[in-house]
Amino acid sequence: DADVTQTPRNRITKTGKRIMLECSQTKGHDRMYWYRQDPGLGLRLIYYSFDVKDINKGEISDGYSVSRQAQAKFSLSLESAIPNQTALYFCATSATTGTGEETQYFGPGTRLLVL
Amino acid sequence: AQTVTQSQPEMSVQEAETVTLSCTYDTSESNYYLFWYKQPPSRQMILVIRQEAYKQQNATENRFSVNFQKAAKSFSLKISDSQLGDTAMYFCAQAGGGSNYKLTFGKGTLLTVNP
């Protein structure tokens, strides 16, 4: 079974609709992240959370909000979707350890199309 | 601010040959990590190799190795004995340590392995 799961895997929505992308992990990691990937731009950080009570804006947070419902769950919401939010969205997790094991592990991605 | 630059948008190599992908970065952090991720057509982000900046020894993982030049802020990936399954987009990424642990990605290099 996958350690980091994202639902849905694909979504088509209309301009102005509110949608939520969900991420769950079974890795026991405390840190979770949301990224967006656009062709030719690599991945850019939207929001990140280092624990349930710690949520921070990333590079491109405008138009997005997040919720950390539990250590294992981190949801991304688009309050009013617009076409330029069409992209591939990734959730990632990492662990804080004394040995510095800070590798991020990614979910399978959610492809979002806003019409 | 952290920046990561991949100057080769596309590369190709013949099966069984060796190829090197380039990456340069800029950071003011003294403690940081460097990564190469692979994204095949399945779009999954797969960790290829990681390097801690405080380690002078270059990381290796089977056919994958890096040339880490800290003073030059260069972090290239060498793939030996290229295989058709290595065809993918490759992303270089850099993260600061501790509370500043967020990944900054380059724009990627599309590698095609030809039979």
Image: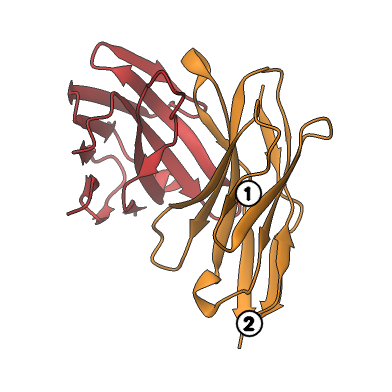
Chain colours: A red, B orange
Give the numbered dot on residue B7. Answer: none
Q: Is residue B20 above or below residue A70?
A: below
Q: Which residue is label 2 attached to?
A: B15
Secondary structure category for the residue under label 2: loop
Front in this rendered view, residue A42 or A85: A42
Question: Counting other residues with Cα less than 10 Å from the Cα at mark 1, is it few (<14), some (14-19), or many (20 or more)?
Answer: many
Helix, strand or loop at mark 1: loop
Q: Given the current orientation, which residue lies at the most extreme front position?
A: B57
Q: Label 1, label 2: how many angstroms apart (C-alpha)? A: 25 Å
Quadrant of residue B75 in the image? Answer: top right
Q: Name the one closer to the observer, A35 or B85.
A: B85
Q: Amino acid at mark 2?
A: Glu
Q: Position of residue A108 (x, y in %)?
A: 31, 53
Name the residue that disc number 1 marks.
B107
Examine the rendered structure and indicate whether residue B67 appears above or below residue B9. above
Query: To which chain does the residue with label 2 belong?
Result: B
Considering the image in quadrants, where does the N terminus of chain A appear?
bottom left
| Quadrant of the rendering where the C terminus of chain A is positioned | bottom left
Which amino acid does the dot numbered 1 rest on? Lys
Above or below, A64 relative to A106: above
